[in-house]
Image (cartoon, rainbow, N blue to C red):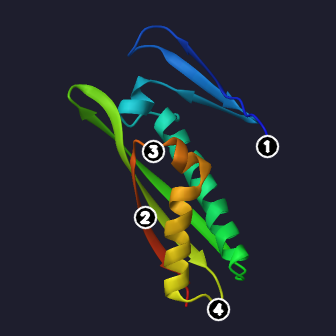
């Protein structure tokens, strides 16, 4: 296993300041506008969604493979809800949309594996205080 690192730098006051988040080969600007409005740049919630989507996609693929299926495609979109609750910005929920192309798997096996892996991926585990829901679609082209 490995330890990972990410860095964020913020300059100035909120809301007028600006920031940059960096990890691996990625560097993205963020601001009050990109976080709480529709401004240019990224935001922590988007990156959290990307982390969960990537973790869950790998977990589903691994679960399918261990069950004897070879996935052609596992695509996950994480919809992170940022809401004002009791006057404070909070993430109450994340909705995962899974679309997978997996030959020969039954709908029942696919749904079971997806549900098991949702709770099992490390990022889901780290987000235990957030409601994570799942919508899973199998073989959408067929």
| Quarter location, residue 58 | bottom right
Q: Is residue 112 above or below residue 54?
A: below
Nearest-to-viewer mark from 2 and 3: 3
Q: Nearer the viewer, residue 135 or 140?
A: 135
How far apart marks 2 and 3 lie (CA) works out to 15 Å
Please state which of the two labelled residues, at mark 2 or mark 1, is closer to the viewer: 1
Provide residue 70's location: percent of width, then percent of height. Answer: 73, 80
Rate crowding at label 2 as few (under 14), some (14 to 19) or many (20 or more) other CA atoms within 10 Å: some
- The quadrant of the rendering that contains the N terminus is top right
**Residue, disc 3:** 128
Placement of 52 over or under 83, stated as above or below:
below
The kind of secondary structure element at disc 4 is loop
Residue 62 numbered tag: none
Closer to us: 33 or 60: 60
**Which badge, 4 or 2, is on the more N-terminal residue?**
4
Q: Regarding mark 3 in the picture, which secondary structure is present there?
A: loop
Q: Secondary structure at mark 1?
A: loop
Whether the residues at callouts 1 and 3 have beta carbons within 8 Å, the answer is: no
Residue 6: give x, y in percent of width and height: 67, 28
User: Counting residues from the N terminus, which is met first, the one under dot 2 or under dot 1?
Assistant: 1
Dot 2 falls on a residue whose secondary structure is: strand
In the depicted structure, whether residue 54 falls above or below residue 106? above
Name the residue located 70 percent from the left edge and 82 percent from the top edge. Answer: 69
Label 1 or label 3, whichever comes before in sequence order? 1
- Disc 2: which residue: 134
Residue occupied by mark 4: 104
């Amino acid at each position: 296993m490995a330890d990972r690192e990410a860095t964020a730098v913020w300059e100035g006051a909120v809301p007028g300041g600006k920031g940059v988040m960096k990890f691996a080969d990625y560097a993205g600007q963020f601001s009050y506008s990109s976080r709480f409005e529709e401004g240019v740049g990224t935001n922590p919630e988007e990156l959290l969604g990307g982390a969960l989507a990537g973790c869950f996609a790998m977990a589903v693929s691994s679960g399918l493979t261990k069950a004897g299926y070879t996935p052609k495609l596992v695509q996950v979109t994480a919809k992170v809800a940022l809401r004002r609750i009791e006057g404070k910005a909070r993430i109450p929920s994340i909705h995962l949309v899974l679309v997978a192309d997996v030959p020969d798997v039954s709908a029942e096996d696919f749904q079971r594996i997806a549900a098991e892996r949702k709770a099992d991926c490390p990022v889901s585990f780290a987000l235990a205080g957030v409601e994570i829901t799942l919508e899973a679609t199998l073989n959408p082209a067929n």
